[in-house]
Amino acid sequence: MNNGLSGAAAIVGLGISEVGRVYGKTGPEFAADAVLSAVEDAGLTLADIDGVLMSIGIVPDNTLISASLGLTNQQLSSKFTFTTPGGASACAAIQYASMAISSGMASTIVYVHYDCPLPSPDLSISDVFGDNLAKGTSGGNPGLIGIPGLSSAIGMTSANQGYALATRRHMLTYGTTSQQLGAIAVAQREWALLNPIAQMRKPMTIEDHQNSRWIAEPLHMFDCSLVSNGAAAFVITGSERAADLPQPPVYVWGWGQCHPGYTMSKGCDLGLQSGATISGQLAFKMAGIELSAIGVRELYDCYTFTVLISLEDYGFVEKGEGGPFAASGALGPGGSHPTNTGGGQLSAFYLWGATPLYESVVQARGHGGERQVPNHDFVLCSGNGGTLDHHASLILGANPRS
Amino acid sequence: MDVAPVQRDEFSAGFFDAAADGHLAVRRCENGHFLPPSVGYMGPSLRCPECQSPEIDWVHASGEATVVSWTVIHAKDGTRQIAGIIELAEGPWMTVALDLESDEGLEVGAALKVSFVHPEGGEFVPVFSLS
């Protein structure tokens, strides 16, 4: 099953800027902090870097991070966009970096994700982008022009409403409840309490979740990700070189992507079936391991619902059983299926796919401290973009392929 | 119901011309396949997804539809709006405002019919209510 690339590259450096409701820097400045931190963590210098991959979050930015850091003669440089593959960019970046390293195109690559949607402590995200009627074209909002404008005009102004429609469909079809989604939020908050850099450090109950204000029914505020400023960066190199570096290498065992291409017509399964199914099958086939080998799950959680549908579509539970599974306590500390062990985007910080990827590396290294999952030989990391339009998977291993 | 004024662009001109005449328009290719007006927020289909024909026109739809899913959107100012994914009788989905007092008792498959609102300074916009 091994395609020759499984285990050939490893994540050897991990860096993060100040993250959360932190101010006074631009997105690229956060990115620079994270890159320098990751390169130092890897025991390398900028002179060792010959490839750069970038992704941004909500706020568009055209800064060329490599040149602004003084990185010259890069042999690879690309930036992922807001929509494609959006939240799947982090997993995709590790995949493409691994392939570039295996092909000899570059030897040591840094990937950075950055965002700065909160300009000051006085402004909320809805102050910046509007929560009711369209105010512009930022944040994926198409404005009030043409067919896409029909959605903006009726209040479909952000990702929240589209995910609400997808979530409702799952509820109507399988009987999933808001309380079951709340169990995901509560489990992740329990993990966040063990994470010193998490934004949300107060305990949460199901009642707190149920009492949090409606954003777009059936989604409460605590079903939705946070908003964060900051950046996270990752250094990837070949596995042979990785063995000589100071940090425990996190080997890239398997990957896959799936972009469902929802038809938005009769028979479309939006909200019922995601790209996690095919993306996961590809990743497990490449890694040559079974689902049961996974000790840690870091699943993209722009909303509680994406965790639920990913658990189902990867096959951890039968289709439609994600709600009762979450409510059983399986996902939290001490549960049978530790998931989003840093608190995720719901309770730690919102750096899109870099949030689950960051925690994947922490766990695979065994550096999770109080929240470390004992069985961390294999970590499943997922990314999701658009309204379930893009899905990417990584299987990361604490050990090299023998 | 709070619907903001929408401006036309070249692609949507046929849709809004029909709306001004009281008709819901749907895209149909030369081979008779119906297309959704947009595919999520990724924009319109560039070709008919079934036959790849580039010859696609706006034609009048029946205006009949059924409920696929819905959300009650809560704005910070306290206003609410019910929006839904609907399936037109012709097959394509649209995301539209649902003109309902409440979503209590609403079910998948509930029959809907189109009407139009005309926000000042914008085009006619379709809204759907229970038929």
Image: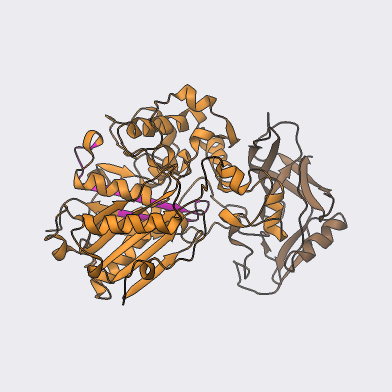
- Viewer-proximal residue among A168 and A397: A397
Q: Residue furthest right?
A: B21
Q: Which quadrant of the structure image shows residue A339?
A: top left
**Res A251 visible:** no
Residue A333 spot, x, y in % from top left: 29, 31
**Res B19 visible:** yes
Q: Which residues are magenta?
A: A372-394
- Viewer-proximal residue among A139 and B43: A139
Please tell me whether residue A389 belongs to the stretch shown in magenta: yes
**Left or right side of A5 for B119:** right
**Left or right side of A291 for A352:** right
Chain A colour in the picture: orange
Q: Is residue A234 above or below residue A122?
A: below
Residue A265 spot, x, y in % from top left: 62, 55
Q: Residue furthest top?
A: A207
Please tell me whether residue B63 belongs to the stretch shown in magenta: no
- Image quarter where the C terminus of chain A lies is bottom left
Residue B28 spot, x, y in % from top left: 71, 65
- Image quarter where the N terminus of chain A lies is bottom left
**Left or right side of A146 for A244:** left
Chain B colour in the picture: brown
